[in-house]
Amino acid sequence: MKLYKLLQDIKYEVINGGVDIDISNISYDSRKIKEDSIFVCINGANVNGHDYIKEAIKKGALAIIIEEEIQVNNENITVIKVDNSKVALASIANLFYNKPSKEINLVGVTGTNGKTTVIHYIKDILEAYNKRTAVIGTLGYEFENKEASIQKINPTTPEALELQGLFREFIDKGAENVVMEVTSSALAKYRVENCDFNVGVFTNLSQDHLDEHGTMENYKNEKMKLFRKCSIGVINLDDKIAEEIIEKATCKILTYGINKEADIKATDIRYKNDCVIFKIKFKEMNWSWWSGKDLKVNIPGKVTVYNALAAIGACLGLGMDISDVISALSNLKYVPGRLEMVTNSLNKNIIVDYAHTPDALERLLMMARETTDGRLVTVFGCGGDRDKSKRKIMGMAAGILSDYCIITSDNPRTEDPEKIIEDVEEGMEKINSSYEKIADRRKAIEKGLKLLKEEDLLIIAGKGHENYQIIGDEKIHFDDREIVKEILG
């Protein structure tokens, strides 16, 4: 594709060379440069792409996109200066892959907690009616149980170049819908610019990622950007920032909730150990004929109700028939590492969950408190090199809602695991809870299992689906679910 065509949607200045050249590849990683490439210099948290221009040219880059004042002493290389190279990357990638998001139904889900579960619930409902659906998120990039060829680099939302490539790959394989997690970081770093979202979903907002955004106000404002990028916004009306999102959104709004009079409201909720049963009331809609009928989702907890309502709203936003959406609720499956019951021959009650924020841990333990007749034992920790202010809060939440806690390591990264545990312990001490500290996560899980009696419930929180631990700079294999099964034999 001609370079001038790739640049048509952005403001730019030609510093050197010309734009009437053929480009066959785009990269922001100098190690992945191929012949006839354009190299986009991204200024990241740890690496500045401008430092790798010479390497990119050696490997075959014909054009360089810069945002800093850089002198390139090579008359054969085109140099283009832009105000923001991340915005430029998103625009160039979108055009390079021929605006793929306009060819599919695209759903983006944002919020502190629940994103992974909601995108998989939406996928389950769509696939119940043979609507071919791909997912992009924390658990990977997948279409019809097959992983995409594009490598997963970022934890959740891909960089703009990989994202547009994924859209094109999924379309070429026959996908009609793509459902993806949209993180605050992705919104802040322009990864989802030029994405044509049919539906945006907001789950909730609570403390997280302050290490990146600095304040809750900044974090909130990043989340709200999605609702200026989509056609229909599906909003959790029970959340404290819902009204502000609705006020500032530029899209049509469909609300859901339990406590407030939302467009889609769950009523008469009954919580059981292995499921949740509820009715749905529709506000000012022509679906009142469904009101009064019991709906059952075979996954426990209040959070399941919210996630199911979010998925219902998204599917309605895509134009599905309400009767089809409701009928498909029985198809909702456990998402790996989310409220996942670990089956075992000893019939011990064990749940592994990804809850790693104060709000997620509190919701998880409140659900557990409601569904267990015995004691609630919680094994959890906090990640290193992340927001330290939430550790004390999580300690308090776990201490208040659990009968006994074992504080352990999560992903300590480059921090001292014992120091992280002490930060959590500070919250425990404030409410005089019963706990102990075992830094070795395997030993902590083993102790939790030994404490379990017949009707007790063990919650192992923080890592969920993750099959690794990051200690220092080393990533070692570690899966809470595998550890439980090994210990129980």
Image (cartoon, rainbow, N blue to C red):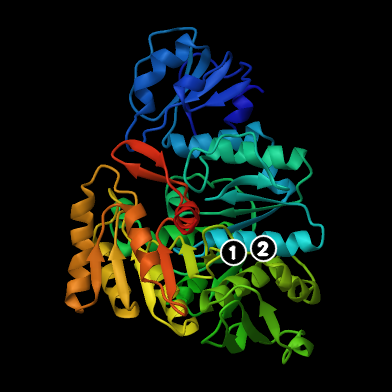
The residue lying at 44 percent from left, 34 percent from top is 85
Q: Nearer the viewer, residue 308 or 288?
A: 308
Residue 427 occupies which quadrant of the picture? Answer: bottom left
Q: Nearer the viewer, residue 158 or 300?
A: 300
Q: Do the residues labelled 2 and 1 touch (CB within 8 Å)?
A: yes
**Res 303 seen here:** yes
Query: In the picture provided, is 112 more to the left or to the right than 391?
Result: right
Residue 207 occupies which quadrant of the picture? Answer: bottom left
Q: In the picture shown, does residue 309 fall above or below 285?
A: above
Q: Percent from the top left, x then y, of residue 434? A: 24, 75
Q: What residue type is labelled 1?
A: Val
Quick one: SS at disc 1?
helix
Q: Which of 449 and 425 is in front in this view?
A: 449
The residue lying at 60 percent from left, 66 percent from top is 251
Q: Percent from the top left, x then y, of residue 453? A: 42, 76
Residue 118: image tag? 1
Query: In the picture provided, is 219 more to the left or to the right than 314?
Result: left
Quick one: SS at disc 2?
helix
Q: Percent from the top left, x then y, of residue 215? A: 29, 60
Q: Percent from the top left, x then y, of residue 245? A: 48, 70
Q: In the picture shown, does residue 23 fall above or below 128?
A: above
Q: What residue type is labelled 2?
A: Ile
Circle 1 packing at 10 Å, graded few (<14), some (14-19), many (20+), is many
The residue tagged 2 is 122
Q: In which quadrant of the rendered image does the N terminus lie?
A: top right
